[in-house]
Amino acid sequence: MNRIDFSKPVSFSIVKAMLENKSFTQLSLSQQKNVSLGQVNKIVKLLLAKGLIEKEKSGYSVANAFGIIELIAKHRDMKSLLLKKTASVFSKEDAINWLKDKAIFCLDSALEAYDDIKTERICAYIKEEYQKEVLEGLDELRGNKTMLCIYALDLPTKPVKIDEKEVTDKIRTAIDLVCDNSTFAAGKLFEELWGQKIL
């Protein structure tokens, strides 16, 4: 029962739907994600046994979002998805403009859209069709200004558009931050989304 890899697309999509819905039934998750009831049931049993979800009259509810996301992070590390990290010739604004049609901004670059933090680096998942172009471009644009951290997009994501750029949604941003050992940075998101304080 403990052998579910929550970083795999199907398991991840089920768990992310739980985090989005907060309350759910196994049937609703199965239909929403177009997966078998057996796959949902296996995950529900594990999360119930760990006390991360609770049984209610008409279904289940998320009891510990952080605990659920930690299960994803056991199998998923942002460092392993890092394709390139380099300082560029770009100012931060120019780097965003260069990447905005080719990338989905993530980690602290997404968090900036939801929180009042400012960061000097840019983190982005590169859309597969632009990977070669961006990685080769970065080799030519190496400098000493804005740090760019370019990641492979490992799991499906539905970005949201904010300020003319695509960013990971709030839940995916929280997940990515935990997978980057930056849980502290996601504190406001955990409180807003699930009413959970992260110490």
Image (cartoon, grey):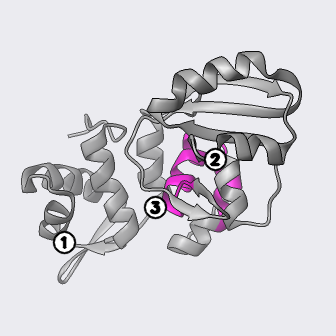
Any part of residue 21 in sight: yes
Q: Position of residue 78 (x, y in %)?
A: 56, 33
Q: Main secondary structure of the magenta part?
A: helix
Name the residue beneath numbered marker 3: 65
Between discs 3 and 1, the one toward the N terminus: 1
Any part of residue 180 in sight: no
Q: Position of residue 131 (x, y in %)?
A: 53, 26
Q: Position of residue 31 (x, y in %)?
A: 14, 64
Q: Position of residue 121 (x, y in %)?
A: 79, 40
Name the residue beneath numbered marker 2: 100
The secondary element bearing badge 2 is classed as: loop
Looking at the image, residue 35 lies above or below residue 21: above
Between discs 3 and 2, the one toward the N terminus: 3
The secondary element bearing badge 3 is classed as: helix
Q: Amino acid at mark 2?
A: Lys
Question: Residue at 26% of width from left, 59% of height from top?
Answer: 48
On the picture, is 156 further left or further right than 148?
Answer: left
Question: Mark 2: few, some, or many residues within 10 Å (few <14, many ≥20)?
Answer: some
On the picture, is 116 further left or further right than 136?
Answer: right
Residue 16 falls within the magenta-colored stretch:
no
Q: Nearer the viewer, residue 98 or 86?
A: 98
